[in-house]
Amino acid sequence: MEGEDGVVMIRRAEIDTRAPFRSVKEAVVLFGERVLAGEVYASNKIKERECKFTYSMWVDPENAATVAVCGGHVSDGVKMHDGHSESQSKLGTVVAELEETKYSLEKAKEEGTLMANCLSSLKEELERTKLELEQLKERESEKRLVMESEIEDVQVC
């Protein structure tokens, strides 16, 4: 790029070449199946996606019954015994929220690490630029001294 007075300006840029997602699954979670698949999947697939973090199973040792909970709702075909249904439903909701929070925390940690790396590289870039500026100032000062001494030599002669 050329600026005013024929001065060449150089810009530095960093290009992120990392994969945008670690897996297809992560992209689906972020954007949804309908967006990525062009709304090909049936509504039951969407329900599965909505229940991804909220699916849990328990075995009731007293009644030997298996209970499946999706977001606090009992799955089709699974019956809950009256004595434990409400507490297990609440437990399912809490477990689901915990899983979701755990995933969010992991993502936040990754983003924090990425930000720390970016900040570090920006600091390095700043230090290099400061050093370069200092060197340019020194060269300019030396040129000025040489020109002043040459002017004095010409005036003396």
Image (cartoon, rainbow, N blue to C red):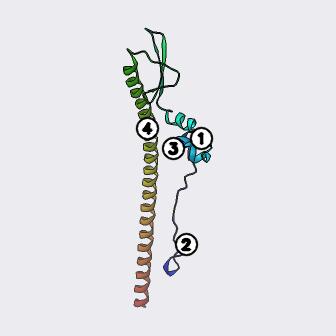
Which one is in front, 115 or 88? 88
Disc 4, disc 1: CB below 8 Å?
A: no
Compare residues 46 and 12 and report the one nearer the observer.
Answer: 46
Q: Residues within 10 Å of mark 1 (few under 14, many from 20)?
A: few
Q: Which mark is residue 34?
A: none
Secondary structure beneath label 2: loop
Q: Which residue is mark 1?
A: 24
Q: Which numbered disc, 3 or 2, marks the residue that appears first in the sequence?
A: 2
Give the residue number, with chain letter if any, for mark 4: 104
**Real-space CA distance between mark 3 and mark 4, rounded to the nearest whole angstrom:** 12 Å
- The image shows residue 72 at horizontal and vertical percentages of 42, 28
Which numbered disc flags the more N-terminal residue, 4 or 1?
1
Which residue was labeled with disc 3? Answer: 30
Circle 2 Cα neighbour tier, 10 Å, few/some/many (<14 / 14–19 / ≥20): few
In the image, taking residue 21 as reference, residue 69 lies left or right, namely left
Query: CB of mark 2 within 8 Å of CB of mark 4?
Result: no
Residues 63 and 123: in front is 63
Earlier-in-chain disc, 1 versus 3: 1
Give, as a three-letter code, the residue at label 1.
Answer: Val
Query: Which residue is disc 2 drawn over?
Result: 1
Which image quarter is the N terminus in?
Answer: bottom right
Viewer-nearest of discs 1 and 2:
1
Identity, as a three-letter code, of the amino acid under mark 3: Leu
Residue 38 rendering spot, x and y as whole percentages? 61, 48
Q: What is the spatial separation of the Cα atoms under label 2 and label 4, in whole angstroms?
A: 43 Å
Is residue 19 visible from the viewing direction of this image? no
